[in-house]
């Protein structure tokens, strides 16, 4: 019993540690490219690094916005092209249906499935026989 409790406590602590690590990864959204060292004592250098970091983030955001817009326009053009193809193939399908409407498959005659000739008749078993059967 003690082993189970110790294992449960240890597993709980381990899961809390893993959750904390995951929370750290989520809060550090950047790739760590411009992580500023906390040990820098020179305030002028720290201020310049902060400005450089903010400029970098703005440029990166511009790139993301530009490509997001490009993706949206590509998605719209893809939808239009697929719609055009669907319309074209729908018209072709209608043409084929008109062309072969009189030549549709006939279900009567030789194509119909043949009934089984030697099929045994179904016979209901009595309740007494069903009770006597051993499965």
Image (spheres, rainbow, N blue to C red):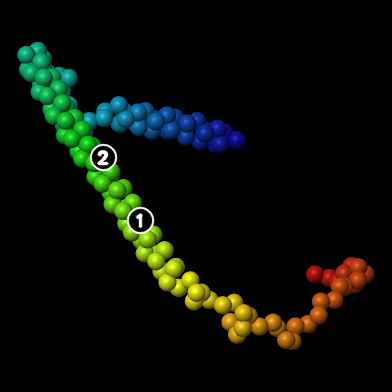
In this view, the residue in front, 116 or 19, is 116
Alpha-carbon distance for marks 1 and 2?
23 Å
**Residue at (66% x, 83% y) in the render:** 114
Rendered residue at 69%/82% (across/down): 115
* Mark 2 surroundings: few (<14), some (14-19) or many (≥20) residues within 10 A: few
Left or right of residue 48, residue 5 in this image: right
Which residue ends up furthest to the top in the rendered image?
A: 43
Q: Check disc 1 and report the residue beneath it.
A: 87
Residue 113 visible (yes or no): yes
Q: Which residue is mark 2?
A: 72
Q: Nearer the viewer, mark 1 or mark 2?
A: 1
* Crowdedness near tag 1: few (<14), some (14–19) or many (≥20) residues, C-alpha within 10 Å: few
Looking at the picture, how far across and down is residue 81, in whole percent?
28, 52
Residue 100 sits above or below residue 31 on the image:
below
Q: Considering only vertical position in the picture, is 129 above or below 56?
A: below
Which secondary structure, mark 2?
helix
Given the current orientation, which residue lies at the most extreme right position?
128
Q: Is residue 42 among what the camera can see?
A: no
Q: Quadrant of residue 39?
A: top left
| Residue ID at (18%, 35%) | 66
Q: Position of residue 133 (x, y in %)?
A: 86, 71
Residue 21, position in %: x, y? Answer: 34, 31
């Amino acid at each position: 019993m003690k082993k189970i409790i110790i294992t449960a406590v240890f597993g709980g602590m381990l899961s809390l540690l893993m959750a904390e690590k995951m929370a750290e990864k989520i809060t550090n959204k950047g790739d760590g490219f411009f992580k500023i060292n906390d040990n820098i004592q020179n305030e002028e250098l720290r201020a310049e690094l902060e400005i450089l970091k903010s400029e970098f983030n703005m440029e990166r955001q511009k790139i993301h916005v530009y490509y997001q817009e490009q993706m949206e326009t590509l998605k719209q053009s893809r939808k239009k092209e697929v719609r055009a193809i669907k319309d074209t193939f729908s018209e072709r399908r209608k043409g084929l249906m008109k062309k072969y409407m009189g030549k549709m498959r006939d279900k009567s005659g030789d194509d119909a499935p043949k009934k089984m000739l030697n099929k045994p008749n179904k016979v209901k078993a009595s309740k007494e026989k069903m009770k006597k059967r051993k499965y």
